Image (cartoon, rainbow, N blue to C red):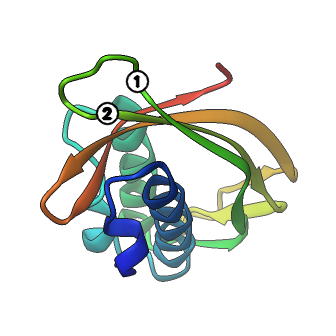
Amino acid sequence: MPVAAMEHTTEGAKAFVAFVVAELNYSQASLASSRLRTLFSEGCTGCRAALAYLATVRAKHGHFEGGVISADSVKARPLAADPLKLIRVDFVYRATRQVVHLGTGRVEIYDAGSAHNHWILSPTTRGWLVTDWTVGS
């Protein structure tokens, strides 16, 4: 993880988002989830859904084509008077067109698009952890 992404500041939180997005792209290309898993809390429902979909594609000997992700218009702010020092990061999640081959002859196609997302980040000794991933709010 880049040193900047480990800093417990709003700029550090933004750098962490960029790092996680790069890890999401790596995980789709490699079908490996171990590195990504260390960045998500077990209680994060959105995170678990992303990991579960990756595991499904891997279990079916499938693969991803396209679907390159980027995060634009990233804004970070501490949650008011929060003793845990949580930071909310809002951003536009963009993805290129994606074809998911599920290894069974089944194919899922997702058009290019974007959606507003927010993550709640919790500071850790290793940087940050995504504790909530919400789409569309």
Read off the residue under disc 2.
Answer: 86
Badge count: 2
User: In this image, 99 relative to 52: left or right?
Assistant: right
Q: CA distance from mark 2 to mark 1?
A: 6 Å
Label 1 neighbourhood size at 10 Å, few (<14), some (14-19), many (20+)?
A: some
Question: Which residue is most to the left?
Answer: 125
Of 81 and 24, the residue lying toward us: 81
Q: Are marks 2 and 1 in contact (CB under 8 Å)?
A: yes
Task: Find residue 127 and report its image quarter.
Answer: bottom left
**In the structure shown, which secondary structural element does the residue marked by tag 2 occupy?**
loop
For the C terminus, which image quadrant?
A: top right
User: In this image, 90 relative to 84: left or right?
Assistant: right
Residue 2: image tag = none
Q: Earlier in the sequence, mark 2 or mark 1?
A: 1
Read off the residue under disc 1.
Answer: 79
Q: Amino acid at mark 2?
A: Leu
User: In this image, 112 relative to 99: left or right?
Assistant: right
Q: Amino acid at mark 1?
A: Leu
- Which residue: 39% across, 80% down? 2
Relative image position of residue 50 (x, y in whole percent): 45, 47
